[in-house]
Image (cartoon, helix red, strand yellow):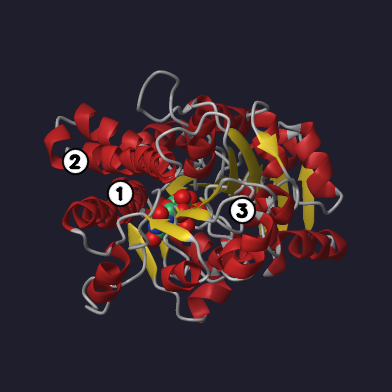
Amino acid sequence: MRMSVIGCGYLGAVHAAAMASIGHDVIGIDVDAQKVAALASGTAPFFEPELGELLQEGLASGRLRFSTEMSDAAGAAIHFIAVGTPQIPGGHSADLRFVDAAVAALLPHLSPGDVVAGKSTVPVGTAERLGSVVADTGATLVWNPEFLREGWAVHDTISPDRLVVGVPSGADGERATAALHEAYRPAVEAGTPFLVTDLATAELVKGAANAFLATKISFINAMAEIAEAAGADVALLADALGHDTRIGRRYLGSGIGFGGGCLPKDIRAFAARAEELGRGEAVGFLREVDSINLRRRDRAVQLVVDALGGLVFGRRIAVLGAAFKPFSDDIRDSPALDVAVRLRGLGADVIVTDPAALDNAAAAHPQLGYATERDDALRDADAVVIVTEWDLYRREMTPEHAGSLVAGRVIVDGRNCLDAAAWRAAGWTYHGMGRR
Ligand code: UDX
């Protein structure tokens, strides 16, 4: 099928390359000429495992192209909208200006029978509003939310755990459903559930999924607060809870909490939309989820301060990690960098290291010290803080080796990812988050 993908960020660039890899003829469109030039030369403009190879294969096959010209979308059977929906400045709602602009720019290039498939995360009601604008051209708008995780984006796009398509009722909706079914045929044939809903339900599925995941993380971090007060160990608690298959262990990772370009802003936008619908009470708990999450950052900073005897001013602190999670260079709302910035604000001599996100971190926070190599960050540190659980810190750093570099064997494990007993046995003072 011929397809266009409007917006080539974390979502759209991967979607375009993945669709080409399963045999479609894809044009990716973005207003950012630099990004388009990078993608067109086979270079991923951000860190995402497997994306570079997929881009190069797609470009070499001739089935994948990139452009800054919206007119190049003309002739495609499906146009995927994959632009960002950030938080509005000074508020909690989603900023829809990029979605609105993308649809407005696409309108003159649509033909009757085309399908416009929104993938961006939007407040419920957006699809219906845009659908009536698109319908004037004879095209049909559907909503096809995306659930990919950064760091696993290629895998999640090619082998999703479910496909959800919200369509309008009637013959147009049926034609559009058939087009989306064809677009995702390999995944559907491999047994991926293909759920067809109305527009509003499809929009809500995405918001609800992120709200649930954020709630699960904040639940375990709330338990960490109790464990701290009671002298219990939240990591053992999570293991024990996780064996209950109704609960499950995934997303019960305690520590400094969630960040990134999705969960924080999506739960806020979800709650803001619920307020608009007069149902704010139904998601009042999301405010708690948000504040539990932000409290963990305070707690991590406090642990470091306490670990250094109450004062960090002038002390050298190695901060291991800057990305909001491993396998990503994304620092948007990164709890890791937030902790580093706050420690710096208290006068600490902070040295941040990260295998992927250092350039992004340095551009955003030039006041912090940076080390490209982990061991250079560790050297002469009075305390070490792990804030992103990269294997480089979690698995490949032994307490003995780290101990030979630092000035003081003090470690704060902001992701509860280390074997506390092993670190203590090597003479370290180990502090976990909600752990004895
Ligand atoms: C998330 C959703 O998982 C995805 O389905 C949606 O499409 C976009 O938002 P992503 O932002 O890539 O994906 O990251 P995710 O892996 O979900 O992690 C989000 C944050 O939660 C990270 O900061 C991570 O460190 C944190 N996290 C995750 C925890 O603190 N504990 C956990 O157990 C899991």
Q: Determine crowd level at label 3: few under 14, some 14-19, many 20+ residues with C-alpha closer than 10 A.
A: many
Is disc 3 placed on a helix, strand or loop?
loop
Please indicate whether residue 85 sits to the left or right of residue 60 in the image: left
Seen from the viewer's position, the closer of residues 75 and 26 is 26
Residue at 70 percent across and 39 percent down: it is 370
Q: Determine crowd level at label 1: few under 14, some 14-19, many 20+ residues with C-alpha closer than 10 A.
A: many
Q: Which residue is mark 2?
A: 283
Q: Which residue is mark 3?
A: 328
Check disc 1 and give the amino acid type: Ala
Seen from the viewer's position, the closer of residues 76 and 381 is 381
Residue at 84 percent across and 60 percent down: it is 62
Q: Earlier in the sequence, mark 2 or mark 1?
A: 1
Seen from the viewer's position, the closer of residues 318 and 140 is 318
Q: Which residue is mark 1?
A: 211
* Image x and y of residue 423, in percent: 49, 67
Residue 83, picture quadrant: top right
For the C terminus, give its image quadrant: bottom left
